[in-house]
Image (cartoon, grey):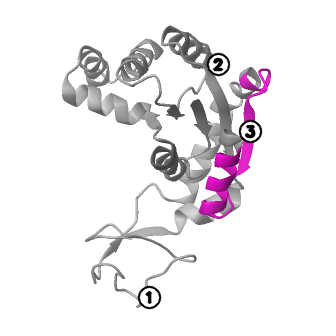
């Protein structure tokens, strides 16, 4: 089963993808991760991509498509793919159709994690982690049991990601809406789009996604 997981940064795509990998044995195909891996492994596509990035240019759809095709070729036909962060444009959606067809695969579901922008801003801007062990916390939803001391390792230093601020989050949301809006009608016309409340409890979101896949 091959699916696309859509949602703005912070909607929980990474967490839900990991759960699908564990439960269904699927493979998460994140274009960013695949690009870094290909460059590091110096594959033909990786070498090509590195030259483009070194020149300060954006990696083309053709290169991204080659990455995805290589990855699908390395997977068994019984292993489902989760497309995370791709496609982002109508052109990429059509390109993905061609790639899947080449590998004898079809797209079963497009699942969008819907979020409330104000609540998402609160969720993301409140995040911080232990500087020593990386355990995650939140100003409102999950503070250390003992103030200023990490529950896991006892560390007393914490850090925040510099881009976890309201302005950046709202910019990312606007970009997501602008880029993703055009591809949804492509899939809605095929009747394969489902929407899940991304602001619900993590387990509830997982249950909703599994219900769609197993329905």
Which region is colored magenta?
Answer: 187-211
| Tag of residue 90 | 2
* SS category of the residue bearing label 2: helix
Residue 179 appears at what percent x and percent y?
63, 30
Tag 3, which secondary structure? Answer: strand
- Cα gap from disc 1 to disc 2, whole angstroms: 47 Å
Which of the two discs, 1 and 2, labels the residue nearer the N terminus? 2
Label for residue 113? Answer: none
Q: What numbered label is drawn on residue 145?
A: 1
Left or right of residue 99, residue 52 in this image: left
Rendered location of residue 27, percent (x, y): 44, 36
Dot 1: element = loop
Q: Is residue 210 magenta?
A: yes
- Residue 131 vs residue 138: left or right? left
Q: Residues within 10 Å of mark 3 (few under 14, many from 20)?
A: some
Q: Do callouts 1 and 2 mark residues in contact (Cβ within 8 Å)?
A: no
Q: Is residue 127 above or below residue 149?
A: above
Q: 150 above or below 35?
A: below
């Amino acid at each position: 089963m091959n699916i696309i997981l859509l949602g703005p940064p912070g909607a929980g795509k990474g967490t839900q993808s990991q759960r699908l990998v564990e439960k269904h044995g699927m493979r998460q195909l994140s274009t960013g991760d695949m690009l870094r891996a290909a460059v590091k492994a110096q594959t033909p596509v990786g070498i090509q991509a590195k030259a483009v990035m070194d020149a300060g240019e954006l990696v083309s759809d053709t290169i991204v498509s080659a990455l995805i095709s290589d990855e699908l070729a390395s997977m068994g036909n019984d292993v489902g793919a989760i497309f995370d962060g791709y496609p982002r444009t109508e052109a990429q959606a059509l390109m993905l159709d061609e790639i899947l067809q080449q590998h004898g695969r079809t797209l079963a579901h497009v699942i969008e994690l819907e979020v409330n922008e104000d609540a998402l801003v609160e969720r993301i801007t409140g995040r911080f982690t232990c500087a020593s062990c990386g355990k995650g916390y939140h100003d409102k939803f999950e503070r250390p049991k003992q103030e200023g001391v990490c529950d896991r390792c006892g560390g007393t230093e914490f850090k925040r990601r510099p881009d976890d601020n309201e302005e950046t989050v709202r910019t990312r949301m606007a970009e997501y809406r602008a880029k993703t809006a055009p591809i949804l009608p492509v899939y809605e016309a095929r009747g394969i789009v489902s929407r899940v409340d991304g602001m619900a409890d993590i387990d509830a979101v997982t249950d909703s996604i599994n219900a769609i896949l197993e329905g």
